[in-house]
Image (spheres, rainbow, N blue to C red):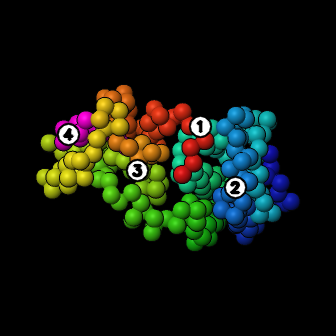
Amino acid sequence: MDGGAPYNPRTVEEVFRDFKGRRAGMIKALTTDVEEFYQQCDPEKENLCLYGFPSEQWEVNLPAEEVPPELPEPALGINFARDGMQEKDWLSLVAVHSDAWLLSVAFYFGARFGFDKADRKRLFNMITDLPTIFEVVTGAVKKQTKEKSSVSNHSSNKSKSNSKQSTESQPKYSKAVPLKDEDDDGMEEEDDEEHGETLCGACGENYAGDEFWICCDICEKWFHGKCVKITPARAEHIKQYKCPSCSGNKRARP
């Protein structure tokens, strides 16, 4: 699939114009046309991709059949994750992958038409002067500072390979409750106070300071990890947790 481009961009300015058109189309899909986009990303269908066109239009479609394709392909199977996450977090995830695809297409053209170091640098600077799709979709900085502020964040021990995505995709729960040898005493006391009166949604028992504790992103009930068979190690790989009850609701929407 060539993205429907009416021309083959050969100069830095043409590649940048191609980038802006595709970017505008994808932003439209994730903002003004979001309901139509959501409906087209049916998890029951095959692997789907979000394409942006230079004409500022967008399309949800299957990937190109030819190997290798005319252009780099967008993230494959975005529709499969649709109902497993809160809608805003799913849109943010698609936005991040869309940003990566736009860069890959732009620098594909740069490599194909022999851009030298100066041209590549100029193209990159022109691109980074624009807000990313992720920033447009999420409102980035403001949202990152207040998102899920009531829950203690213990990600300081983990490397953050994607600083823009790390806060926005942080689930609305603490994946690991602070243990006696973690963090400082103030944080531990604060967390005990926060959860002290909370009862486990499965067994009905109170929170204890040395237990692993996880919250469902749908119903916002807290559970002992052992009651829902979630370990701290497994929780590290869960972006959005749904408790057993909410897992039965396929179309859980925020």
Residue marked by disc 1: 250
Q: Quadrant of residue 77?
A: top right
Residue 227 higher or lower than 140, as above or below: above
SS label for mark 2: helix
Q: Name which residue type carries label 4.
A: Ala
Q: Which residues are magenta?
A: 205-215
Q: Which residue is mark 2?
A: 35
Circle 4 residues within 10 Å: few <14, some 14–19, many ≥20? some
Q: Amino acid at mark 3?
A: Lys
Type of amino acid under label 1: Lys
Give the residue at x 16% y 52%: 189
- Write down the residue under mark 3: 172
Could you tell me which secondary element the residue under label 4 belongs to?
loop
User: Between marks 4 and 1, how big is the CA–CA gap?
Assistant: 32 Å
- Callout in the foreground (2, 4): 4
In this view of the protein, which residue sits in the foreground, 135 or 115? 135
Sequence-earlier tag: 3 or 4 = 3
If you read the primary sequence from the N terminus, does the residue marked by circle 3 or circle 2 appear first?
2
Query: Is 189 drawn above or below residue 229 in the view shown?
Result: below
Name the residue beneath numbered marker 4. Answer: 208
Mark earlier in primary sequence (4, 1):
4
Residue 175's place in the image compared with 106, above or below, is above
SS assignment at label 3: loop
